[in-house]
Amino acid sequence: MDLHMHSHQMTHRLPDWRAAALAGLAGGVVFLVLAMLMASLTGAGLWSPTHHIAAIVMGPGALAAPAAFDFGVALAALAVHFALAVALGLLLGLVMAPFHFDSSWGMASLVGAVFGLAVYLVNFYGMTALYPWFAELRGWPMLIAHLAFGVVTADAYRQMEVDDGEDAPSLMR
């Protein structure tokens, strides 16, 4: 894995916003699938993550019957989850572009993993003041899902971004 640790000084390079948003969506899909699978495997129930996410906008009442499918809860969860995934994708693009962290797959993956770890820490240690039910989700399953989100988002951004002066994403980098 080539990390290209040279020349990661800040420049005035703007991110490819379209690529960053789409990368956030890609990472969000991977995160949600992993979170649901791990919740199912740990006995919390397949739909538990949707209930926890929806509770951000619906309140703690959305946590009732977390193992059961609820269309309203699922719809709210998808809206919140993918809005956050896009916002986080944009934020990651804002970090990657000016520092040229997209210079190699290894560097992008490393930065994505660190970003995923930071999001995990903010979500499950910082946001618990507002959403105390997040504290019960702390642990390896959610950490792995967040690390995967970061790596997938960073690598998808690197793959889809349009280099300065190009009109199409490079598929060969």
Image (cartoon, rainbow, N blue to C red):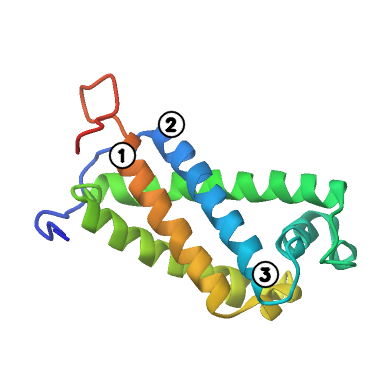
Most extreme residue toward the front is 41
Question: Residue 82: x percent and y percent?
Answer: 62, 45
Which residue is depicted at the point 69% across and 68% down? 40
From mark 3 to mark 2, how far is it between C-alphas? Answer: 31 Å
Q: Amino acid at mark 1?
A: Gln
Q: Are marks 3 and 2 in contact (CB under 8 Å)?
A: no
Horizontal arrangement in the rendering, residue 110 relative to residue 72 (left or right): left
Which numbered disc, 3 or 2, marks the residue that appears first in the sequence?
Answer: 2
- Compared with 159, 47 (above or below) is below
Question: Residue 75: x percent and y percent?
Answer: 78, 44
For label 3, the SS is helix
- In the image, 102 versus 32, the foreground residue is 32
- Compared with 134, 54 (above or below) is above
For label 2, the SS is helix
Question: Residue 34: x percent and y percent?
Answer: 57, 61
Q: Nearer the viewer, mark 2 or mark 1?
A: 1
Most extreme residue toward the left is 6
Q: Which residue is mark 1?
A: 159
Q: Which residue is mark 3?
A: 39
From mark 1 to mark 3, how far is it between C-alphas? Answer: 30 Å
Which residue is depicted at the point 36% across and 42% down? 157
Which numbered disc, 1 or 3, marks the residue that appears first in the sequence?
Answer: 3
Q: Amino acid at mark 3?
A: Ala
Q: Which residue is mark 2?
A: 18
